[in-house]
Amino acid sequence: MSKPVIQRDESIQHECLEKLCGIVRELSSQGKPIEMRTWLMAYTTDVVTCYSYGDPLGLLNDHEQAVLWREVIAALAFMTLIFRHFPLVARIGPQIPLAFLERMSKTISLTMGLHYEARRRARLVKNDFDRPVDSKASKGGRRPTVYHEILASNLPDEEKSVNRLSDEAFTIISTGGETTSRSLSVALYYVLATGGVLPKLRQELDKAIPDPTRVPPIKELERLPYLTAVIRETLRIGMNVLPRSPVISPEKPLQYGEWVIPPGTSISMTYSTVMMDERVFPDPWKFDPGRFLPKNPNTERNTRHLVVFGRGNRNCYGQNLAMSEMYLVIAGLFRRFELGLYETVFGRDIKVVRDCFLGETSLDSKDLRVTVISERR
């Protein structure tokens, strides 16, 4: 997803942000702590489904569905362990009738139901690809989706099949909502838990956003140095993707230092190991946005080692969307609300202790919970 595509439909994110802030306001009026992970995931999922499907899942409009979706993604995270060691299960799953899956497990049936919906939409788009597509509904067209991006690309025809289209959309939706919502949860926790961070962030946001109900375009938020530093440090310390990402040079040998790596050799690295290397990031478990501020002489080096999205043609397809969501949500929430942590335990609710492809917290986690102390003006 390129920046021009995201900027073209940026109103999607602003509309979802308003819904998210409305939910926070409504739940705070009930005097109860707010479990933020569910609603952050509702936001990121509604946004990514708009870009992928053309329409949101509507989780921000349905509390029950939002909670259920959180359970679905948690179940999917556990299932990735099975898929990794028994890939045949992943190939057979979509062939099982949905009615049978519904009798087995509600969460599994919902997960596969999303897969079937992705396939149905892929088939429709492929059948009428020649129909004019426009990002503005008022012109009578339809918002471009990931399906249209693939079909309009120069990929070979076999890479434009219905199954390929649906697999691509399903992957983007299932991982795109989860990864960014976790990063947002980590950001909220560290900003609230780390002394000195919130006042600096708030000072910058108050100056850049005089009216808390009017968050500026994302390209303006990207110019804010401290907000940018907070986001980058969140991505560094959050450790979203844990497994190694292997690559293979099929024909040519690779030179690495004094070693020659033969063709066909699988090469991989763990991103989290790079970003927690104390030779690059001293005291790596400390949340310190100063590592990425322009005045830091090591900022360029630190940014070069921020490999959370990968590098080259293997980098994350949705990194521009993820970054835009983080800028908008962090700026929107902290400019509008005075938040406080509620019985959040780092080792239970924030720290990564399970490898489900994505880093997950403990099974007894209560997730990030906050209270709204006041609404800021």
Image (cartoon, rainbow, N blue to C red):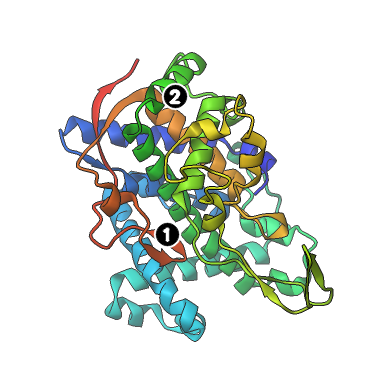
Residue appearing at x 32%, y 25% in the figure: 337
Which secondary structure lies at badge 1?
strand
Check the image and report above or below for 113 versus 308.
below
Residue appearing at x 49%, y 59% in the figure: 175
Q: Quadrant of the C terminus?
A: top left
> For the view shown, which residue lies furthest in the left direction?
31
- The amino acid at mark 2 is Leu
- Report if residue 300 is visible in the image: yes
Task: Find disc 1 in the rendering and name its residue.
Answer: 359
Check the image and report above or below for 69 versus 290.
below
The image position of residue 172, as x and y in percent, is 54, 59
Mark 1 crowd level (few <14, some 14–19, many ≥20, 10 Å Cα): some
Quadrant of the rendered structure where residue 264 is? bottom right
Which secondary structure lies at badge 2?
helix
Residue appearing at x 60%, y 74% in the figure: 163
Q: Is 224 displayed left or right of 156 in the figure? A: left
Quadrant of the rendered structure where residue 166 is? bottom right
Q: Nearer the viewer, residue 175 or 244?
A: 244
Q: Nearer the viewer, residue 68 or 57?
A: 68
- The amino acid at mark 1 is Gly
Q: Nearer the viewer, residue 63 or 129?
A: 63
Residue appearing at x 67%, y 75% in the figure: 266
- Report if residue 14 is visible in the image: no
Total numbered labels placed on residues in the image: 2
Mark 2 crowd level (few <14, some 14–19, many ≥20, 10 Å Cα): many
Sequence-wise, the earlier of marks 1 and 2 is 2
Task: Find disc 2 in the rendering and name its residue.
Answer: 201
The image position of residue 55, as x and y in percent, is 50, 50
> For the view shown, which residue lies furthest in the right direction?
252
Quadrant of the rendered structure where residue 370 is? top left
